[in-house]
Amino acid sequence: MPATEKDLADDAPWKKIQQNTFTRWCNEHLKSVNKRLADLQLDLSDGLRLISLLEVLSQKKMYRKYHARPTFRQMKLENVSVALEFLDRENIKLVSIEIFPSLMCLWRAVACQCSDLITSHPCTASDFSVHLRQWE
């Protein structure tokens, strides 16, 4: 049965349900450190809540320091990089990341920003696939 454009749209009902479910799940875990997510893409973009979530779930601290008050885009990217490095060192593979569309959006934004910083040109869809393969 072919997927319709409506089912694949960014605002498809099943995607919103999935996003809300994941947000509630994150908030349930972040409660223990008095943090909360409202907008996944926005709240995870500086890496701080992502780091907190990983620390709560793993009951471990990050392996390296991160910026507690990131003000510049580079600092935010470094924080996300610390979180991704933590996942890698814990042998957690990021497969089926498309299950969580908001995390995929976050990863695309990070990959795009990295691409923009390195090459000084707007990134394309092919840039995302190259970056994603590094974490599979």
Image (spheres, helix red, strand yellow):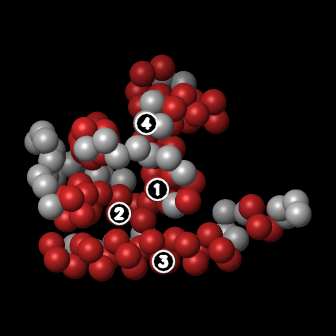
Question: Quadrant location of the N terminus?
Answer: bottom right
Determine the residue located farthest toward the top in the rendered image. 119
Extreme residue in the front direction: 91
Disc with the residue nearer the chain's start (4 vs 3): 3
Say which element carries label 3. helix
According to the image, label 1 marks what residue? 103
User: Which residue in the structure is indicated by mark 3?
Assistant: 21
Q: Residue sitting at 25 percent across and 38 percent down?
A: 89
Q: Amino acid at mark 1?
A: Leu
* The disc label shown at residue 126, or none: none
Q: Picture coordinates of residue 91 (x, y %)?
A: 31, 41
How many marks on residues? Answer: 4
Residue 131 visible in the picture: yes
State whether residue 76 appears in this view. Answer: no
Image location (x, y in percent) of residue 116: 47, 29
Q: Residues within 10 Å of mark 1 (few under 14, many from 20)?
A: some
2 and 1 marks in contact (CB < 8 Å): no
Mark 4 and mark 3 residues within 8 Å of each other at the beta carbon: no
Residue occupying the point 35% across, 46% down: 92
| Residue at position x 50%, y 47% in the image | 95
**Which one is closest to the eye, mark 2 or mark 4?**
4
Q: Quadrant of residue 55?
A: bottom left
Mark 1: secondary structure: helix
Q: Which mark is residue 43?
A: 2
- Label 4: which residue? 135
Q: Tell me the amino acid under the disc marked 2.
A: Asp
First in sequence, mark 3 or 2: give its number: 3
Could you give the CA–CA distance between mark 1 and mark 3, rounded to whole angstroms? 13 Å
* Nearer to the camera, 11 or 29: 29
- Which badge, 2 or 1, is on the more N-terminal residue? 2
As drawn, is 66 to the left or to the right of 77?
left
Q: Secondary structure at mark 4?
A: loop
